[in-house]
Structures are given as structure tokens and as C-alpha cells.
Amino acid sequence: MANVLITGTNRGIGLALTRHFIEQGDSVIATCRKPSVELRACAGVRIEAEVDITDSASLDALRERLGRTRLDVLFLNAGILESGGLADLDFESVTRQLEVNAVGPLRTLVALRPLLRRGSKVALMTSRMGSIADNTSGGSYGYRMSKAALNAAGKSLSIDLAQQGIAVAILHPGWVSTDMTRHSGNVDPDEAARGLIARVDALTLETSGTFWHADGSVLPW
Ligand SMILES: NC(=O)c1ccc[n+]([C@@H]2O[C@H](COP(=O)([O-])OP(=O)(O)OC[C@H]3O[C@@H](n4cnc5c(N)ncnc54)[C@H](OP(=O)(O)O)[C@@H]3O)[C@@H](O)[C@H]2O)c1
């Protein structure tokens, strides 16, 4: 049984990940800003509320509450998507997406790093939209920039944490039917969660730092 901590678990993919890790017998610490009815209904989960990934004080308080808990899997899932084409670019929105999607996971990792041990795994929920090679449609400046920055952080983390025996997966979940996509995705959150967990299970120090689709294919930077 692994200790798994997931961010952004009150809905969407984070909620599905929480349910699937519990189903396979793992011990889940589900963090969120405010728990939802659905999250509260997950039997056996440890809910840690008031955790905002942009707020170091809330992350330090979480680490204090966790004490000496060892984290086998740290799943940095929380994120936001705001539209932003060239014609109506809102720089506050660009900055907000960088703060939540790129800085937030790094801030969380740094706060919780003392709880990671040799053999622990870190999963970063990025997006194919952060791939520069794969960008054929333009637009979405803030989201694309933030996820490309997260990919860069993930690669550095895979190098810097290797000496401690900690592996890092950089993951795209597919186009998933959640609030983020206004439920237009072609993958349901359960299917996405199954694929994402399979990638974490298969992750080794040798494959650390790879950018994967949940279906197992390797994505271009
Ligand atoms: N859905 C897709 O097709 C898709 C594709 C590629 C990548 N992704 C990535 O997958 C992850 C999950 O997406 P989703 O589709 O499940 O989206 P979602 O349904 O909108 O859920 C986003 C989650 O992130 C949390 N969150 C946002 N800002 C936060 C903050 N500052 N502190 C703590 N939690 C915060 C939200 O909590 P609140 O309820 O408190 O806002 C919510 O739990 C995101 O990183 C997203 O970029 C999704």
C-alpha cells in the first residue's frame, strides 16, 4: 500500500485519481481548497482542505499537519485553463496561469520535498498544449506558456531528484470530460485516471523526465 498525495481532488481528474488509488488499496491524502460532496463521499480518504498551491503558507501548514508521513507518490494535478487569444490577450490571466500551473506545482513540490524518500515518485499533470512541437493551432497563450514552463521544471526535477532516487513523470491526461473542458472531452475522467496511474506504476529512474500521454505514448517537447 502506497501513500499518495494528490492536489486538486474536489472534482475532475483529481477526484477520479483519488477514487482509483483508493480502489487499488492505496492510502490517499486528497488536498483541495474546499472539499466537494463527491470527495467527502470517498470512503477512507484523508481530506486536507484549505490547500492552495499558490500559497506557500497553506503548503507549509499542510507539511506540518502531515508530520513524518512518507509520500510514495506526489501527484501534482491542480491547474486552471483560461482562454486567451491574441486579439483579447489579458496579461493578468497569463500571469495567473503561470502562477497556478507552472509555479504552483513547483511550490508544492518544494514544500513537501522533506516527505519524499528514495523510491518516491512525482507526477506532474501538464498538457499536450505545453508541447511546442505539437502546437499546430496557436492561441491559448497563458495556458500553453504555463504548461511548457511546467514541462521545463519537470525535466530539471527529474535530473535534480535522481540522486535522491526520486523519479518524475510529466503527464498529459488526454482530452478529458471535466469542468475545465466544459465536459467536451472525448475521454472520461475514470479512463484518464487509469492511464495516468499506469504511467506512474511503470515509472522508473531510467524513464524519469519523460513526457507521456496517459495512453503510454511519448509526446514531443
Ligand atoms: N481536462 C483535460 O482535458 C485536461 C487536458 C490536459 C491537462 N489537464 C490538466 O489536468 C489537471 C486537472 O484538470 P481537470 O480537467 O480535472 O480540471 P478541473 O475539473 O477544472 O479541476 C481543476 C482542479 O484544480 C484545482 N485548483 C485550481 N486552482 C487551484 C489552486 N490555486 N490551488 C489548489 N487547487 C486548485 C481546482 O480546485 P477548485 O475547485 O478549488 O478550483 C480543481 O480541483 C489540470 O492541471 C489540467 O491543466 C486537463
Image (cartoon, rainbow, N blue to C red):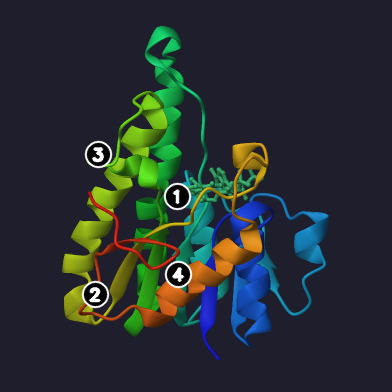
Label 3 secondary element: loop
Q: Position of residue 101 (x, y in %)?
A: 42, 43
Distance (Cα) linking label 3 and label 4: 26 Å
Q: In terms of depth relative to the viewer, which is nearer, 103 or 134?
A: 134
Q: Which residue is mark 3?
A: 132
The earlier-in-sequence mark between 1 and 2 is: 1
Q: Residue at x 64, y 69 (%)?
A: 18
Q: Which residue is mark 2?
A: 207
Q: Are marks 3 and 4 in contact (CB under 8 Å)?
A: no
Q: Are marks 1 and 4 in contact (CB under 8 Å)?
A: no
Q: Which residue is mark 1?
A: 56
Label 1 secondary element: helix
Amino acid under label 2? Thr
Amino acid under label 1? Ser
Amino acid under label 3? Ile
Distance (Cα) linking label 3 and label 2: 21 Å
The earlier-in-sequence mark between 3 and 2 is: 3
Note whether 121 is above or below 135 in the view shown: below
Which quarter of the picture shows residue 9?
A: bottom right
- Badge 3: how crowded within 10 Å, few (<14), some, or many (20+)? some
Q: Which residue is mark 4?
A: 74
Q: Quadrant of the N terminus?
A: bottom right
Which quarter of the picture shows residue 209?
A: bottom left
The earlier-in-sequence mark between 1 and 4 is: 1
Label 4 secondary element: strand
Mark 4 and ligand 1: say if the CB distance to the nearest ligand atom is below 8 Å. no
Q: Position of residue 168 (x, y in %)?
A: 31, 69
Amino acid under label 4? Leu
Note whether 53 is above or below 123 in the view shown: above
Q: Residue at x 34, y 66 (%)?
A: 169
- Badge 4: how crowded within 10 Å, few (<14), some, or many (20+)? many
The label nearer to you, 3 versus 4, is: 3
